[in-house]
Amino acid sequence: MTEKITINTIKAMKGLDPIVMVTAYDYPSALYADRAGVHITLVGDSLAQVVLGYDTTVPITMEEMLHHTRAAGRGCQRSLLVADMPFGSYQKGPADAFENACRFLKETPAHSVKLEGGVTMAETINYLTMRSIPVMGHVGLMPQSVHQMGGYRVQGRGKEGLRALLDDARAVQDAGAYSIVLEGVPMEAARQVTRELAIPTIGIGAGPHCDGQVLVLNDLLGLYDQFVPKFVKRYAEMGKEMERAIREFAKDVTERTFPGKEHSYE
């Protein structure tokens, strides 16, 4: 698949081809993700933790998200570029959410926004989608609600948990979202949600039965080691390799073996 990916591309992949989504926060990471063939590049608010060093995603601001979405957008040529709406940018009400979502579509190359919440956010999602703003939903474990949830806890367990998860997912779909992220839910619950929805589900810590999968780039590359969730698979240990290379550089400088003649001008 070489043509530009749109929300219609993503919707058409439901039940057919697995959707690949990764996060990216700057030009080089988005460029390499795009070249690798991902379908969706998400400028996630996980930026707060894995790049900016905050303890949670809550402190990140609109200005920080806009800045990094612009940077990632310069490297994103083929994949669908989605921007996370940060905490506080959409919870006040639909009109406020619309104003902030417009900033992403007008001031960055983003094609869509993503926001957290099910039943409680259905009105806002509908308000946005009825005004030509594509929305990706997000239910289950919602990192922006970490304080209210009492930590990063698996959601959707038991009959009541599953019922609430299904209610949230249906509400997001009925409000007009074109896809939905399921985070931190039992795999059988994710399977049931995926079966019942007409829009694609993209899992993170939701097992193998979703229509697609997403991971935080820094997690899969081994660039963040403060906390490694059970659902993360390391595909590289680039953090350790970076440290090794920098140590080698420091050793060469200390021992005066760098720069050599081959690195110097006559």
Image (cartoon, rainbow, N blue to C red):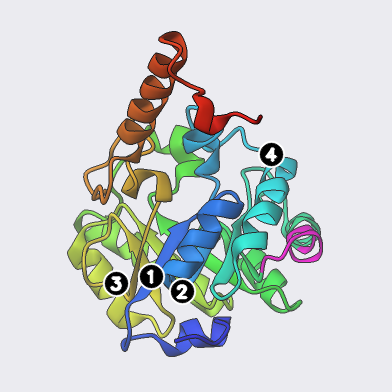
Residue under label 1: 20
Instruction: Please report contact status of discs 2 and 3: CB closer than 8 Å, yes or no.
Output: no
Determine the residue positioned at 58% across, 83% down.
Answer: 4
- Secondary structure state at the residue bearing disc 3: loop
Quick one: label 4, few (<14), some, or many (20+) residues within 10 Å? Answer: some
Quick one: label 1, few (<14), some, or many (20+) residues within 10 Å? Answer: some
Disc on the earlier residue, 4 or 3: 4
Determine the residue positioned at 55% across, 81% down.
Answer: 5
Instruction: Please report contact status of discs 4 and 3: CB closer than 8 Å, yes or no.
Output: no
Residue under label 2: 39
In this picture, residue 229 sits left or right of residue 40: left
Determine the residue positioned at 34% across, 40% down.
Answer: 238
Q: What's under tag 2, amino acid-wise? A: His
In the rendering, at what x and y percent does residue 54 appear? 53, 28
Q: Is residue 246 above or below residue 100?
A: above
Disc on the earlier residue, 1 or 3: 1
